[in-house]
Image (cartoon, rainbow, N blue to C red):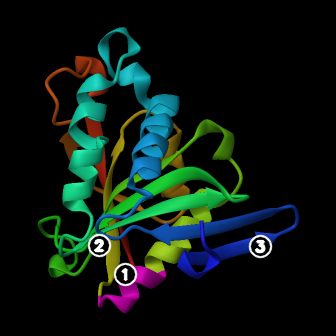
Amino acid sequence: MENSELISLAAREGYTLNLRQLEPNDSAIATYVQTGRSGYRDHYCHLWPKGDPWPYIDRNFTTPIVSSEVGREGLSHWLVYWNNEAGGICKVDSGKAYPGFLNRQSLYLEKLYFRKACTGKGIGGSMLEFLRDFALKAGKTGIWLEAMQKGPALNFYLKNGFEIIGETQVPYPEVVPEERHMWVLGLAF
């Protein structure tokens, strides 16, 4: 990891928080895939029969899939480094709008996953601040996302100013039926 490739978000007492945006053919894509898998497994196995999230992993976190996305117009992928270790991932889509929310002038936060060891440390809040700035620089006036109706992620987003603007479901037929319900959340600024 070269410092010239990093965006520093925080250097506080006892820790550093940095981002690395992926580029096409980036050697860090494998680290992004592994970190995304770990972060997803740490928090979402309960959504899947027998606790096995293979349907999601196979559709989202393989090197060929991520490699095909990185560099695509409107998509941005970041590795989140906590104390110089890959601790999370972030993916946004500046071209995907939610009908009726900010007249298509919003950023879609598709993925924000952290390894369990990196939760509860303020990383999520720092990422939301970064994404707000990123969205504003891109001419956007808000952020939207989809969150499970049950679980700590919903409370995190609501505490950070997001409001429920719609309802949806996990789009994979393999998900446990009673766990498929999601809220669409929006934050205007």
What residue lies at 42% left-to-right and 23% top-to-bottom?
45
State which region is magenta: 133-139
Residue 77 against residue 119 in the figure, above or below? below
Viewer can see residue 60? yes
Q: Identify the element where label 1 is drawn.
A: helix
Is 83 situated left or right of 52 in this image? right
Read off the residue under disc 1. Answer: 135
What residue lies at 57% left-to-right and 75% top-to-bottom?
6
Query: How many numbered tags mark residues here?
Result: 3
Read off the residue under disc 2. Answer: 107
Q: Identify the element where label 3 is drawn.
A: strand
Q: Earlier in the sequence, mark 3 or mark 2?
A: 3
What residue lies at 68% left-to-right and 47% top-to-bottom?
120
Asked whether the residues under the numbered discs 3 and 2 touch, taking CB atoms below 8 Å apart as contact, a structural biologist would say: no
Residue 1 against residue 55 in the figure, above or below? below
Crowdedness near tag 3: few (<14), some (14–19) or many (≥20) residues, C-alpha within 10 Å: few
Residue 42 against residue 120 in the figure, above or below? above
Disc number for residue 11: 3
Viewer can see residue 189? no
Check if residue 140 falls in the magenta segment. no
What residue lies at 42% left-to-right and 30% top-to-bottom?
44
| CA separation in Å, label 3 and label 2 | 26 Å
Asked which quadrant contains residue 129, the reply is bottom right
Disc number for residue 41: none
Front-most of 100 and 22?
Answer: 22
Of badges 3 and 2, nearer the viewer stands 3
Front-most of 43 and 83?
Answer: 83
Is 80 situated left or right of 97 in this image? right
Q: Amino acid at mark 1?
A: Ala
Q: Position of residue 162 (x, y in %)?
A: 43, 62
Q: Position of residue 97 (x, y in %)?
A: 16, 69
Asked whether the residues under the numbered discs 2 and 1 touch, taking CB atoms below 8 Å apart as contact, a structural biologist would say: yes
